[in-house]
Image: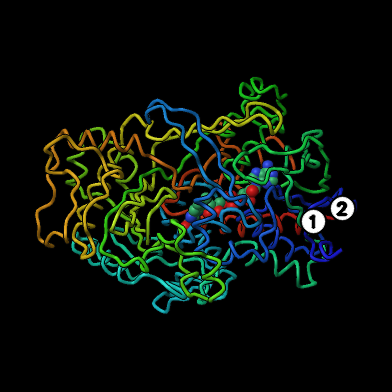
């Protein structure tokens, strides 16, 4: 059986009905964790159980431009969590996208390389998880292919290649954004990812190699080990959900799994009801991501006893923090008319006039285009903070006052339109700008509503629910900032009105269609109180996830709502850990893949140290 030789199965083989370590979720952190643990302890049998499919030999994973189809067509590589209707955002329900394929988010994401700001991790105050502790792992994961980087800051022999434009990037658009940003007082950074720089823009670095191939956790870590003959005890079972961990006498002894029969990927259920048990002699590591992991814990009886009682699940450990503290990078997408030629945007792929498969066949370099072009780290100035009102200023002082490197907002530009609903009646090419709140105050939650997969979880994003109105005000600020920048770019031809606020009639801020940009020294748009209201209403209407959520199984003491200790042990259960972004007590002010890779590395060190200690004691 060739599957067996590769260590990847779609059916659980009899010889794996009990293993040493179960890794419940083959995503970004899970693949890194299992691979490194297998390096340190090749004698341990390790089984990754992933709900999605194998990602090996999958053109839609390897070739960056396919992210458009993966994300925009809700492919089977995606798992979408549907939010509840929420009053503060106009009774809208928000969908949150996650990767659901081997490699998880790293197999389908936009590949933007973005690292935590150092103060973010220090703020966690978790022993062993400060910036100085994590920096070595952040270097270990990467081979940084930019000569201007410093070895004090970056890694040069890690498994993930980090490259600038790779095989292709639309430099005209990038140059124009950078120049316009500099004109607005935000210079081009030498290294925006040195963990301290702020108030600057930079051409995005990406998880791609110099040939423009995507770097993901499974290809960088897992597949090479499954093929090298040195990791005979490392195994993967795909297309199976982990329903719950089995806890006996206060110890995790295995998991219950169910085959995934859902090909669409759009539901979190979609499984057959035949349950199988896999035993774990030493440990169950839950690695199902920020939305998957708290659900596995709750179905195992670990969670808030009231939530569990409502879901008809018996409580094994009353741990109220599970599924709470949901923090996400919430924000907007907005769009502009441009003078760009059609071959300098990716819109042809959305409207079907360009075929990705044809591009592959003719070895078109643009297949390596990641489409996330220029990014930034921004803070409002002191006077802007003051103008945003008393409540905002108080919140600002509390969250940002002590750390001048803390990122409040990120603006980034795309090389085309942001959504599949590309309008067909325009003579200008559209490009989009994303803006997200980097350190939000909004908090949400995800909880199970029953013991089985057919019980859809209840997801409350909590977007814009913070009492201070901080996140809303920051979105308004971001909207104004990016608009001043974009209208000074030579390619600017106006705003695409449906993606902008509906300003009051006669407003100076109304969207326009024009022949070219305003002069660089043109006065800024003057927004009236009515205009501000319109922007705020628009923010509530459009606020969306930027797919960087954390926090639902955070480290910390039980008294503080923590779910895990600093060794990633679930409070109150032996042999049960969580290893993914859900463990982060707060966002680290950056796109989140880097933190997930880093957590996988750090967790492998923690666990291999524990196993080594165990062996020495014996
Ligand atoms: C569309 C999109 C674009 C993004 N763009 C970027 C970007 O450009 N740069 C960046 O830094 N970050 C980006 N991110 C975010 C980043 O990719 C994720 O935050 C990160 O990959 C999450 O890592 P993780 O290990 O916590 O979880 P994941 O990588 O999501 O892994 C969880 C895995 O568990 C599996 N799973 C879930 N439930 C179960 C279950 N019950 N049983 C078995 N398996 C289960 C899932 O299928 C998944 O493979 C993006 C994310 C998305 C969705």
Say whether residue 584 is left or right of residue 432.
right
Say whether residue 100 is left or right of residue 275.
left
Task: Quadrant for residue 233, please give it.
Answer: bottom right
- Specify whether residue 579 is in view: no
Residue at point 61% right, 39% down? Answer: 267
Few, some or many residues within 10 Å of mark 2 (<14, 14–19, 20+): few
Q: Nearer the viewer, residue 491 or 318?
A: 491
Above or below for 43 versus 556? below
Say whether residue 223 is left or right of residue 142.
right
- Say which quadrant the C terminus sits in: bottom right
| Count of picture labels | 2
Q: Pinpoint residue 573: horizontal percent, then vertical percent.
A: 72, 37
Q: Circles 1 and 2: CB distance less than 8 Å?
A: yes
In terms of secondary structure, where does tag 2 sit? Answer: loop
C-alpha gap between disc 1 and disc 2: 8 Å
The residue labelled by disc 1 is: 9
Task: Quadrant for residue 545, please give it.
Answer: top left
Q: Pinpoint residue 530: horizontal percent, then vertical percent.
A: 16, 33
Few, some or many residues within 10 Å of mark 1 (<14, 14–19, 20+): many
**Which residue is at the far bottom?**
147
Above or below for 360 versus 463? below
- Say which quadrant the N terminus sits in: bottom right
- Specify whether residue 335 is in view: yes
Residue at point 31% right, 33% down? Answer: 469
Q: Pinpoint residue 148: horizontal percent, then vertical percent.
A: 39, 77
Residue at point 80% right, 72% down? Answer: 229
In terms of secondary structure, where does tag 1 sit? Answer: strand
Query: What kind of colouring is applied to the model shown?
Result: rainbow
Q: Pinpoint residue 8: horizontal percent, then vertical percent.
A: 77, 59
The residue labelled by disc 2 is: 13
């Amino acid at each position: 059986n060739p599957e067996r030789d590769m260590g990847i199965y779609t059916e659980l083989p009899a010889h794996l009905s009990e293993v040493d370590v179960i890794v419940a979720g083959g995503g970004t952190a899970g693949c890194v964790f299992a691979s490194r643990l297998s390096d340190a302890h090749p004698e341990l049998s390790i089984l990754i159980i992933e709900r999605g499919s194998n990602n090996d030999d999958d053109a839609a994973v390897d070739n960056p431009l396919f992210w458009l189809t993966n994300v925009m067509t809700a492919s089977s590589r995606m798992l979408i969590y549907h939010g509840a209707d929420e009053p503060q955002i106009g009774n809208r329900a928000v969908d949150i996208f996650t990767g659901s394929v081997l490699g998880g988010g790293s197999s389908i994401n936009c590949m933007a390389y973005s690292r935590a700001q150092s103060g973010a991790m220090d703020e966690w105050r978790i022993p062993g998880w400060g910036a100085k502790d994590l920096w070595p792992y952040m270097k270990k994961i990467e081979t940084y292919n930019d000569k201007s980087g410093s070895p004090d800051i970056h890694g040069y022999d890690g498994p993930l290649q980090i490259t600038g434009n790779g095989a292709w990037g639309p430099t005209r658009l990038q140059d124009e954004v950078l120049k316009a940003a500099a004109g607005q007082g935000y210079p081009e950074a030498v290294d925006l990812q040195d963990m301290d720089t702020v108030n600057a823009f930079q051409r995005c670095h990406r998880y791609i190699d110099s040939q423009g191939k995507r770097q993901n956790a499974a290809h960088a870590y897992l597949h090479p080990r499954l093929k090298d003959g040195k990791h005979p005890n490392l195994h993967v079972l795909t297309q199976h959900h982990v329903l719950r961990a089995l806890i006996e006498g206060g110890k995790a002894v295995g998991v219950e799994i169910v085959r995934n029969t859902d090909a669409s990927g759009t539901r979190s259920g979609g499984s057959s009801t035949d349950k199988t048990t896999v035993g774990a002699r030493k440990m169950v590591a839950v690695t199902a991501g920020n939305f998957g992991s708290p659900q596995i814990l709750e179905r195992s009886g670990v969670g808030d006893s009231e939530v569990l009682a409502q879901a008809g699940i018996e409580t094994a450990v009353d741990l109220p923090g599970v599924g709470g503290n949901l923090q996400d990078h919430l924000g907007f997408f907005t769009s502009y008319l441009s003078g760009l030629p059609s071959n300098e945007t990716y819109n042809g792929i959305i409207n079907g006039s360009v075929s990705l498969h044809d591009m592959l066949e003719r070895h078109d370099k643009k297949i390596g285009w990641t489409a996330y072009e220029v990014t930034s780290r921004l803070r409002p100035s002191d006077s802007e903070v003051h103008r945003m009102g008393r409540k905002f200023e108080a919140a600002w002082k509390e969250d940002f006052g002590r750390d001048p490197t803390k990122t409040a907002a990120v603006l980034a530009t795309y090389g085309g339109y942001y959504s599949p609903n590309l309008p067909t009646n325009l003579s200008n090419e559209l490009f989009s700008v994303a803006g997200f709140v980097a350190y939000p105050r909004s908090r949400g939650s995800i909880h199970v509503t029953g013991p089985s997969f057919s019980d859809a979880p209840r997801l409350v994003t909590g977007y814009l629910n913070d009492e201070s109105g901080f996140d809303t005000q920051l979105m308004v600020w971001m909207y104004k900032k990016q608009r001043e920048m974009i209208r000074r770019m030579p390619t600017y031809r106006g705003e695409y009105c449906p993606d902008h606020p509906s300003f009051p009639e006669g407003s100076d801020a109304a969207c326009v269609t024009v022949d070219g940009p305003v002069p660089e020294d043109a006065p800024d748009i003057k927004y009236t109180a009515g205009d501000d209201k319109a922007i705020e209403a628009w923010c509530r209407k459009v606020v969306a996830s930027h797919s960087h959520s954390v926090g639902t199984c955070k480290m910390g003491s039980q008294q503080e709502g923590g779910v895990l200790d600093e060794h990633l042990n679930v409070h109150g259960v032996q042999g049960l850990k969580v290893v993914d972004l859900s463990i982060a007590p707060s966002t680290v002010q950056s796109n989140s893949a880097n933190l997930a890779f880093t957590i996988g590395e750090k967790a492998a060190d923690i666990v291999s140290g524990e196993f080594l200690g165990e062996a020495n004691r014996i």
